[in-house]
Amino acid sequence: MIRDKDSRNKLNRPRQIFLAAAVAAMGMLAFGCAKSQVVAPPPPAVPVVVAKVSQQAMPVEVTAVGNVEAISTISVKSQISGQLLEVHFKEGDFVHKGQLLLTIDSRPYQAQVDQAKGAIVRDQAQLQQAEANLAKDSAQEEYARSEALRYANLMEKGLVPKDAVEQVKSQAAVAVQSLRADRAAIDSAKASLVLDQGSLNGANVQLSYCSIYSPIDGQTGAVMQKAGNLLKAADVPIVVINQVNPIYVNFTVPQQFWSDIKKREGAQALRVIATVPQDPGEPQQGVVTFVDNAVDSATGTIHLRASFENPQNRLWPGLFVNVVLRLSEQANATVVPTQAITQGQNGTFVYVVKPDNTVEPRPVVSSRAIGALAVIDKGLHSDEIVVTDGQTRLTKGAKVQIKGNGSEAAPF
């Protein structure tokens, strides 16, 4: 019987193990259910920096990239052929208007001047001789005319033959023709004198080209023809001079600003600020001096040119600069610090702090930023509070803790 009891115990042992496991599983399930009913503590408030939305006057400005251009660029070329004898400046020097720059061999041109002077002296001598002949022949013509008149009277009285009268008349006619020849000689001498005087003037002009002077105040570039080279008339430039004070900055603005430009252009000068990248100096102040007469149909932009005083040569031809064109001023513009605006998948937005210190994302439209402030065209109202620092940890409805002055918005 004892053996039978042990056999029954062996048979019931797997059932006992199963029941124990089931009881344990039920206990654990009950414990899990009890644990799930425990409420988790709320997440801590996110510390943020905030600012209050305000309204203030903001300038309407257009930013662009400008290109610096010399107000005048002169390519100095030789107007005559000849050997370059001397360069009177160093490359890169600042030269003044009227300063001697280059000297070309003048001997061939001086010879032409001397030759023209000699021709003028000859013409003057011929003119004097023609005038003397005219004076002499005038006296002879007057005598011949009086003799012809006297012989005609004598012939009427029968004192001289007719042949003698005809001979005297013929001499008078010859004297008249001599006068005509003398006057023609004088006219020819005067014409030769004028012609040779023109040749002299031309030779003097050619001679003057042997000395080349600076036509403007400006900065010289590289000298492309060295002393000793043979120059050709109107050939390659010898040196290029740029006038850099004042100086131009060219830039373009979108066509939607045309109405503001047109309105301000006639009333007063449009102010422009140019900043040289990585230049620690103050921005340069200038005024618009040219507005193109058409909109570029390919880009939809308008070309403008501003003039800047440049005494320190901070603006240099070919340099790219950042340009700000101030058009007008917008009164009561809604503004926030630029760091309050976040770029999202659906556009720009800000986190607005609600009275219960939770935040909500608010889509906004900003037309421009001036310095540290952004102008909000749509999405915000004055005196609302926006988050300016700590946005990366925020989600919709998140609780925030305002750093700084408790619940007060930080000023900006």
Image (cartoon, grey):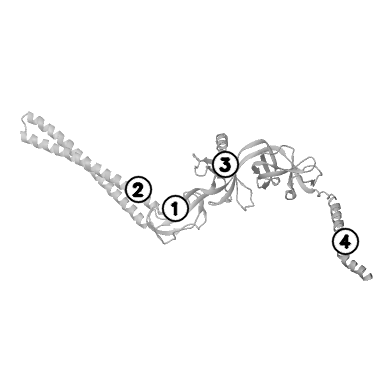
Judged left or right of residue 385, residue 287 is: left
Q: Secondary structure at mark 1?
A: strand
Query: Are the residues tagged 2 and 1 within 8 Å (C-beta)?
Result: no
Q: Work out which residue is located at the far top of the displayed protein and give it.
A: 157
Q: Secondary structure at mark 4?
A: helix
Q: Which residue does the numbered mark 1 point to in the structure image?
A: 76
Q: Amino acid at mark 1?
A: Val
Judged left or right of residue 66, residue 386 is: right
**Labels 3 and 4: the sequence-earlier one:** 4
Q: Which mark is residue 20?
A: 4
Q: Which picture quadrant has residue 160?
A: top left
**Residue at the spot 62% in from the left edge and 47% down from the top edge:** 283
**Labels 4 and 2: the sequence-earlier one:** 4
Q: In the depicted view, which residue is nearer to us: 232 or 391?
A: 391
Q: Amino acid at mark 3?
A: Val
Q: Which residue does the numbered mark 3 point to in the structure image?
A: 287
Q: Secondary structure at mark 2?
A: helix
Query: Are the residues tagged 3 and 4 within 8 Å (C-beta)?
Result: no
Q: Residue 359 at x, y = what percent?
A: 75, 43
Label 1 and label 4: CA atoms lie apart by 111 Å
Q: Which picture quadrant has residue 110?
A: bottom left
Query: Are the residues tagged 4 and 2 within 8 Å (C-beta)?
Result: no
Circle 3 crowding by C-alpha within 10 Å: few under 14, some 14–19, many from 20 = some
Q: Which residue does the numbered mark 2 point to in the structure image?
A: 201
Circle 1 crowding by C-alpha within 10 Å: few under 14, some 14–19, many from 20 = many
